[in-house]
Image: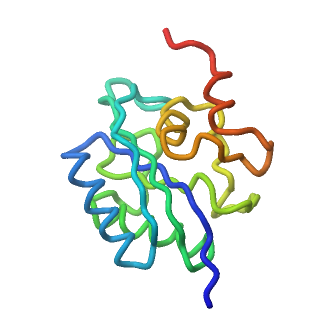
Amino acid sequence: MVKSTKFAIMLGGNLGNSAEIFREAVKKLAAAGCGELKMSRIYRSAPVDCVPGTPDFSDAALTGIWPGNALELLRLCRKLEQEAGRPADHSSRESRTLDLDLILFGDEVRNTPELTLPHPRAQQRRFVLEPLAELIPEARFPDTGRKIEECLRNLPPEH
């Protein structure tokens, strides 16, 4: 029996029909072996650390299980981003059709040039925590032990 690992991915984008692009990405993730997929509603958020004039983003959380390792899932996400029209070489400060960020992969803590788990800024970003809290509020970040709902509650109020 193959061991499957629970994961959380953030879907984001601000070019094209994000709802349709997200649906297509989820279908492709399922076809590639992701199971038990659940997606949050789609949230809207102002761009963070992007070039001036960047349009607002659509964001959603996706949870599920994956039978492979974290790097295999990351590489699948990158492939799907490219299929959705995102260039392989891109800046995180630019608009995009699809961004798939691996936030959590089981209890894995990793810091390599290719992948950092949990995602390094997830615990400070409302646009990550709100959708995740909709699906897995009690889940903990394995590096700090903090629950998603706790991280969200401790963020400064929005202006």
Q: Residue at x 34, y 35 (%)?
A: 57
| Residue drawn at 40 percent across, 63 percent down | 88
Look at 57% across and 32% down and name the residue there: 125
Closer to the camera, 18 or 113? 18
Q: Position of residue 126 (x, y in %)?
A: 53, 29
Quarter of the picture holding the N terminus: bottom right
Q: Image quadrant of residue 105?
A: bottom right
11 vs 86, left or right, is right
Q: Nearer the viewer, residue 112 or 147?
A: 147
Task: Provide residue 70's location: percent of width, then percent of height.
Answer: 62, 70
Q: Residue 66, position in %: x, y?
A: 54, 73
> What's the residue at 34%, 64% (across, down)?
82
Q: Nearer the viewer, residue 115 or 5?
A: 5
Position above or below: 1 against 159: below
- Residue 15 in picture, x, y percent from top left: 25, 43
> Is 17 displayed left or right of 126 in the figure?
left
**In this image, 117 relative to 29: left or right?**
right
Q: What is the count of numbered marks?
A: 0
In the rendered image, the vertical position of residue 148 relative to residue 63, given as above or below: above
Q: Residue furthest bottom?
A: 1
